[in-house]
Amino acid sequence: MKSRKALIFWCALLLVIVCLTVFAQFISPYGTNEMNMDRIYEEPGKNHVLGTDHLGRDVMTRLLEGGKATLSIAVVSVLMSLIIGVIYGGISGYIGGFVDVVMMRFLEALIAIPSVIIILAFQAMMQGGVWSMAFIIGITNWLVTARIVRSEFIRLREAEFVQMAKMFGTPTWKIILQHMLRNSIPAVFVVTLFNFAGAVFMEVSLSFLGIGVPPSIPSWGSMLYYAQNDILIGAWWIGVFPGLMIFATILAINFIGEALKNPERRRLNA
Amino acid sequence: MIAKWIGKRVVMGIMVLFIISFLSFFLMHAAPGDPATAFYGGNAQLLNAAEKARIYEAFSLDRPIIQQYSAWLSETLKGNLGYSSREGRPVSIILMERFPNTLLLFSVTMSSIILGSILLGTAAGMKTGSLWDRGLSIISIATSSVPSFWLGILFISLFSVKLGILPSSGTMDIRGDGGLLDRLRHLIMPASVLILTHVGIYARFLQESIKTESRNYYVVVARANGVAEREVRKGVLRNASIPFLNYIGMTIPSFFGGSIIVESLFSWSGLGQLTVNAVVTKDFPLLMGSLLFTGLLVVVSLFLIDCMMYAVDPKLRKGGLK
């Protein structure tokens, strides 16, 4: 019961964050790139609730707008990694045998490579916009999904109802989609949630390093990139708030994932 | 038996390195821009077609890509990683200059994380239902949700800007003698950021594997037979450390990734910062070298962890291999 209340709380928090970024332009009175050189580095106060940055831009406006880039990159990349992971894991788990062994060895090798490395290599080659960022994160984030889908498929392949369906001559695609994939959804959903947190993390990390989304597009990561210099002159508000948003988002997702993971685990233990 | 086991690991490691080398080579090859122009920088417009062709021939860029790759690979195996296009110095020398700093940061953080998580995790796992037992999972989720670089920014603004007690960046004081104490002072912030954001998840994993292990029948039987509690705990901890070591091995790649970012924030002149700079300045030979070298480090550390597992787990030693 307690965990259910917690789940609702974290879902609500996530929903609030998403709504704030989606409806950013209605909430904030300033433009995203509206500069005001008379009011640079203004502390949080009456005019600017969260202060202004080195170009006199309103931090709150950029914070809400920045969520758009960060969250949409995460959504697109997670969808992409979900598709790749399901296909890869599905093939490996369904066919099994030698194909499965080869595919799993390859997957293990890929898991041993820090994904930041692959992303850095890609990023050096493609000059990042929002879409290419989503693409790069998407094609490095599918490994765990593939693993889970594979183990689910192997478990389900032997299940009685699947054997039965086969016996009745149900077409293979129907078995895969309706029986196996549908029954893997709970496990895959939890992994996808954690992947989402990972994708947010990756985007902000790269933008923070200055090799993510171009500086003209605000994102939580690129705001922190500028904040590195701003904190040295004491402008703490530029760095604190984007970080808080990232922290709240990832925290909410992680807690939701935990809450959903636990019943699953309890069922498996029983 | 052990030979077969080691052989399997080595093959795996070589495969990882091969994929990284393949990836980095072909990505760099596909990168936009002309290597000849990149080499001559600003003067490139002055080159005519014949001169360009000569440069191409000199660098063997006119040969098929597979030949280029095999030539590059064989040179790499000899330890020749080429020359940095920014600095003009051999990549291998630059890497070796940076390596000690990364090794220092990595060994300090990783050993503190392991030590800390053993302390926190056992305290939580052994006393089921205690406050700490229930609190640890919440704390670990919360701390692992903090972006390490953000925590770093907060630390800088508190300890360097407000209080002025710790240096905000670098590996040593330029004015100082670069002694051990100076280095350690610079190490405090990057290391503590990495430790604080990571120790929670590892402690939690150990806590859970201790709990799973304690539920086993052999523990109940040992207790019923009056085996000293100390000895029971020793056995449980030893067996719980096997999945824990495995978990460390699994997370080492992402831990390396995390330290790349922290190194850049604190200008800790290690491999991570070097790699990021190579991406920013488009120094491809340096980037390829550092990607490959980081991959090698990951493979070696995974191998070390495997060896530790081999030492701890009697099933592996007795040939209970899958």
Image (cartoon, coloured by chain):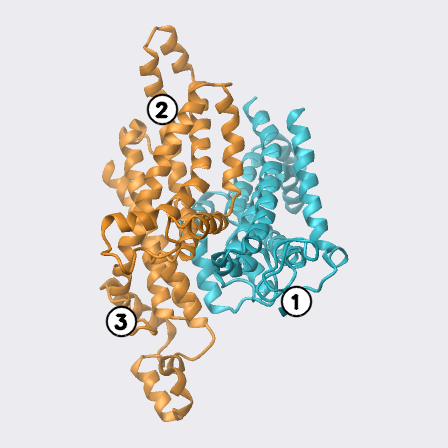
Chain colours: A cyan, B orange
Q: Both on one chain, marks 3 and 2?
A: yes
Outermost top residue: B225
- Crowding at dot 3, Cα within 10 Å, few <14 / some 14-19 / many 20+, comes out as few
Which of discs 1 and 2 lies nearer the camera? The answer is 1
Residue nearer the viewer, B64 or A144: A144
What residue sits right under mark 1 in the picture?
A33
Q: Position of residue A121 (x, y in %)?
A: 44, 63
**Nearer the observer, disc 3 or disc 1?**
1
* N-terminal-most mark, 3 or 2: 3
Image position, residue B85 (x, y; %): 34, 74
Element at badge 2? helix
Q: Which mark is residue B19?
A: none
Q: Which residue carries the number 2 mark?
A: B237
Mark 3 or mark 2, whichever is nearer to me: 3
Q: Is residue B23 visible?
A: no
Q: Quadrant of residue A31?
A: bottom right
**B34, above or below A240, in the image:** below
* Quarter in which the N terminus of chain B is drawn: top left
